[in-house]
Image: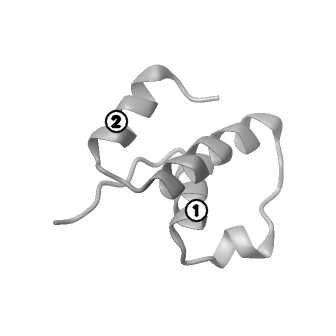
Amino acid sequence: MGTVTDLEIVKKGSHSATYENGFADGQSARSEGSALTLYLQVGIDDYAKGFRAGFFGQLASRKV
């Protein structure tokens, strides 16, 4: 699970709720040592993008 700071940074980036859910799930999966499914490796929706960001420890900011 991520720290409070990580979650606050994600909220400030104005990502969708789906992205934020994926981000939190990705952090949890990384801490549990889970492997990525094909969908999570190549998915282009907000959940998959957020999951990868959380899994690989990247906080991507949305370009305006």
Q: Which residue is drawn at 68% across and 71% down?
A: 41
Q: Quadrant of residue 42?
A: bottom right
The single residue placed furthest to the top in the displayed view is 4
The single residue placed furthest to the left in the displayed view is 64
Number of the front mark, 2 or 1: 1
Q: Earlier in the sequence, mark 2 or mark 1?
A: 2
Residue 14 appears in the figure:
yes
**Structural distance between the alpha carbons of marks 2 and 1:** 17 Å
Q: How many labels does the image show?
A: 2
Q: Which residue is drawn at 27% across and 40% down?
A: 12
Spot occupied by residue 56 in the image (x, y as percentages of width and height): 58, 50
Vertical order, 6 against 33 (above or below): above
> How is this picture coloured?
one colour
Q: Quadrant of residue 37?
A: bottom right
Quick one: quadrant of the N terminus?
top right
Q: Residue 29 carries which label?
A: none
Kindly identify the amino acid type of the residue bearing the numbered disc 2.
Ile
Residue 56 appears in the figure:
no
Check whether the beta carbons of the residues at disc 2 and disc 1 lie within 8 A of each other.
no
Q: In which quarter of the image is residue 60?
A: bottom left
Q: How many residues crowd mark 2 within 10 Å: few (<14), some (14–19), many (20+)?
A: few
Q: Residue at x 81, y 36 (%)?
A: 32
Vertical order, 5 against 30 (above or below): above
Quick one: quadrant of the C terminus?
bottom left
Kindly identify the amino acid type of the residue bearing the numbered disc 1.
Tyr
Spot occupied by residue 50 in the image (x, y as percentages of width and height): 53, 57
Residue that mark 1 sits on = 47
SS at badge 1 = helix
Q: Which mark is residue 9?
A: 2
Q: Nearer the viewer, residue 58 or 14?
A: 14
SS at badge 2 = helix
